[in-house]
């Protein structure tokens, strides 16, 4: 099994992209986007997480089994988000008055 060698320039480019995305996250935090604040922040966070996973954790150059494990992890994360959101969004539906 051969090892993929990544140049330092690519690491610096990814690091720069992460710093720019962090600055964008801080800038967006001071802008009132209403209900889209969380959507924008989570979108930027997911992009940063993907960059870290793909390049710093070397998943981009890994085997299909590693990709399957990563996809499985994101699948379970999505399930947890859906279950948590369904609980949170339906709390006002139940009335406890008698």
Image: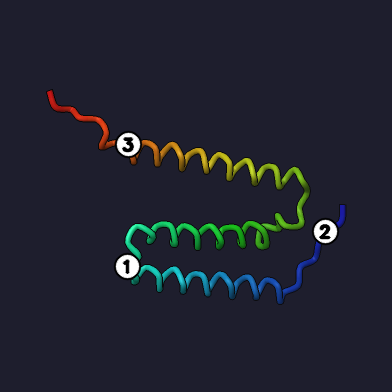
Residue 10, quarter of the rendered image: bottom right
For label 1, the residue is 32
| Other residues around mark 2 within 10 Å, as few (<14) / some (14–19) / many (≥20) | few
The Cα atoms of the two marked residues, 2 and 3, are separated by 49 Å
**Up-down relation of residue 98 to residue 38 (above or below):** above
Give the x, y percent position of residue 21: 51, 70
Give the x, y percent position of residue 90: 32, 36
Indicate which disc residue 3 carries: 2
Indicate which disc residue 85 carries: none
Residue 65, quarter of the rendered image: top right
For label 3, the residue is 90
Which residue, as the protein is rendered here, is positioned at the far top?
98
The answer to whether the residue labelled 1 contacts the one labelled 2, judged by CB atoms less than 8 Å apart, is no
The answer to whether 30 appears left or right of 94 in the picture is right
Question: At 80% from the left edge and 66% from the top edge, which residue is drawn?
Answer: 5
Question: At 70% from the left edge and 54% from the top edge, which residue is drawn?
Answer: 59
The answer to whether the residue labelled 1 contacts the one labelled 3, judged by CB atoms less than 8 Å apart, is no
The answer to whether 58 appears left or right of 40 in the picture is right
The answer to whether the residue labelled 2 contacts the one labelled 3, judged by CB atoms less than 8 Å apart, is no
Give the x, y percent position of residue 64: 77, 46
């Amino acid at each position: 099994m051969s090892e993929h060698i990544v140049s330092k320039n690519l690491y610096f480019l990814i690091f720069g992209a992460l710093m720019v995305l962090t600055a964008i996250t801080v800038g967006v935090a001071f802008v009132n986007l209403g209900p889209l604040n969380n959507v924008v922040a989570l979108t930027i966070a997911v992009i940063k997480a993907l960059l870290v996973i793909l390049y710093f954790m070397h998943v981009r150059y890994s085997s299909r089994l590693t990709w399957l494990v990563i996809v499985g992890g994101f699948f379970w994360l999505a399930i947890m988000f859906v279950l948590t959101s369904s609980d949170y969004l339906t709390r006002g539906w139940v009335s406890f008055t008698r």
